[in-house]
């Protein structure tokens, strides 16, 4: 697969190149070189701008007036709206009841035609999205994670990291996993640059660990429900392609508690001066609490570790204060 090139399609992409910054605090903690890939700076506030933006960009290449229909726990919907507005079209988003009013209001403010709440989980919201799509023969279905164009868009993270590291492939990439779209993009990008999926530490929260449970069972597992507060990771089943890739590349799977992920958000805000939601905090919890060398014992002081700071919009000072009160001393 060649490097994604959309420069001839439109002058303005619905995503941007984000900084890669070395963290002195995390490097000291981990005993290696830790870099932060700041995808919280994407137009939609999360990495979803890349994959969702790429899917919508390609879908509109022949007809720019097609309406977009997105199913989402929040961030993918916001990315779909952000991309749609930037590309001059309209977007409807379906979310489950677990999506907060805070997130739904953000999606509306971003320019959504409407936000429809349906069902207890993303599965039910996605079913409603597909029903709406049947009534619009020119409409575009925008999955939050399960489409080759999404994986291709997400793979640009690796292209940028390799360039920003002076041509070197990261020794380790840490990323949160929901439906698996980010993981698949990273695996594709690493393979393109001579790396492999074994470079990736795939992190989930307890109560949303569909990939970890699938790897444990040796088959695709559907969780009975999502009990984690990290609703952005709330895919009861990961994409089949993500499970296959995780098995094939021997990905390193990690599961952290909601409490650890919440504490990571608080510590990251204190030390790095940036706000992230708990789904993103899960990846940082591997460094702050799990201990990266427990997962990757072969690390050396010269190893280059990239944490995908995937961002997320379900965060605020008020939310972090609640986390501090509830999770400060919990395991």
Image (spheres, helix red, strand yellow):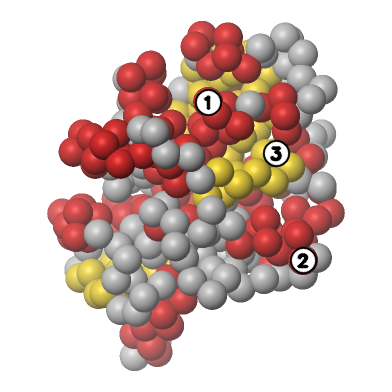
Residue linked to disc 3: 200
> In screen coordinates, is 260 left or right of 31?
left
Residue 288 image label: 1
Which residue is nearer to you in this view: 319 or 197?
319
Which residue is nearer to you in this view: 93 or 236?
236
State the residue at coordinates (51%, 9%).
24
Q: Nearer the viewer, mark 3 or mark 1?
A: 1
**Label 2 neighbour load within 10 Å: few <14, some 14-19, many 20+:** few
Please state the horizontal and vertical placement of residue 183, each as a whole percent of the image.
63, 48
| Among numbered discs 3 and 1, the one appearing first in the sequence | 3
Q: Quadrant of residue 11?
A: top left
The secondary element bearing badge 2 is classed as helix
Task: Tell me the CA gap for discs 1 and 2.
Answer: 28 Å
Q: Nearer the viewer, mark 2 or mark 3?
A: 2
Residue linked to disc 2: 217
State the residue at coordinates (34%, 58%).
74
The secondary element bearing badge 3 is classed as strand
Please state the horizontal and vertical placement of residue 313, each as a whole percent of the image.
30, 45
| Among numbered discs 2 and 3, the one appearing first in the sequence | 3
Q: Are marks 2 and 3 in contact (CB under 8 Å)?
A: no
State the residue at coordinates (30%, 41%).
326
Task: Tell me the CA gap for discs 2 and 3.
Answer: 20 Å
State the residue at coordinates (39%, 33%).
329
The secondary element bearing badge 1 is classed as helix
- Residue 118's place in the image compared with 261, above or below, is below
- Residue 68's place in the image compared with 47, above or below, is below
Which residue is nearer to you in this view: 123 or 14?
123
Q: Are marks 3 and 1 in contact (CB under 8 Å)?
A: no
Q: Is residue 139 visible?
A: no
Task: Tell me the CA gap for discs 3 and 1.
Answer: 17 Å
Q: Is residue 322 visible?
A: yes
- Residue 269's place in the image compared with 157, above or below, is above
């Amino acid at each position: 697969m060649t490097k994604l090139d959309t420069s001839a399609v439109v002058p303005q992409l619905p995503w941007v190149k984000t900084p890669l910054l070395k963290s002195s605090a995390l490097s000291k903690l981990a005993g290696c070189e830790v870099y932060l890939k700041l995808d919280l700076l994407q137009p939609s506030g999360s990495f979803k701008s890349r994959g969702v933006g790429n899917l919508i960009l390609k879908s509109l290449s022949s007809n720019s007036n097609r309406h977009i229909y997105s199913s989402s726990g929040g961030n993918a919907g916001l990315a779909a709206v952000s991309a749609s507005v930037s590309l001059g079209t309209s977007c409807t988003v379906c979310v489950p009841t677990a999506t907060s009013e805070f997130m739904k209001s953000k999606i509306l403010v971003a320019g959504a035609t409407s936000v429809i709440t349906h069902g207890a989980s993303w599965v039910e919201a996605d079913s409603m999205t597909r029903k709406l799509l049947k009534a619009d023969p020119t409409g575009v279905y925008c999955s939050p994670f399960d489409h080759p164009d999404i994986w291709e868009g997400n793979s640009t993270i690796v292209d940028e990291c390799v360039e920003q590291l002076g041509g070197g492939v990261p020794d380790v990439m840490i990323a949160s996993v929901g439906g698996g779209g980010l993981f698949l993009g990273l695996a594709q990008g690493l393979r393109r640059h001579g790396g492999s999926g074994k470079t990736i530490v795939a992190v989930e929260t307890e109560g949303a660990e569909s990939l970890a449970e699938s790897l444990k069972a040796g088959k695709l597992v559907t969780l009975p429900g999502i009990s984690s507060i990290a609703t952005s990771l709330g895919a009861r089943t990961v994409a089949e392609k993500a499970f296959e890739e995780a098995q094939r590349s021997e990905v390193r799977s990690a599961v952290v508690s909601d409490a650890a992920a919440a504490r990571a958000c608080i510590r990251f805000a204190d030390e790095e001066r940036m706000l992230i939601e708990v789904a993103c905090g899960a990846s940082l919890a591997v460094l702050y609490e799990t201990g990266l060398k427990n997962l990757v014992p072969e690390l050396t002081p010269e190893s280059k570790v990239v944490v995908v700071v995937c961002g997320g919009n379900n965060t605020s000072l008020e939310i972090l204060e609640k986390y501090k009160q509830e999770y400060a001393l919990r395991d």
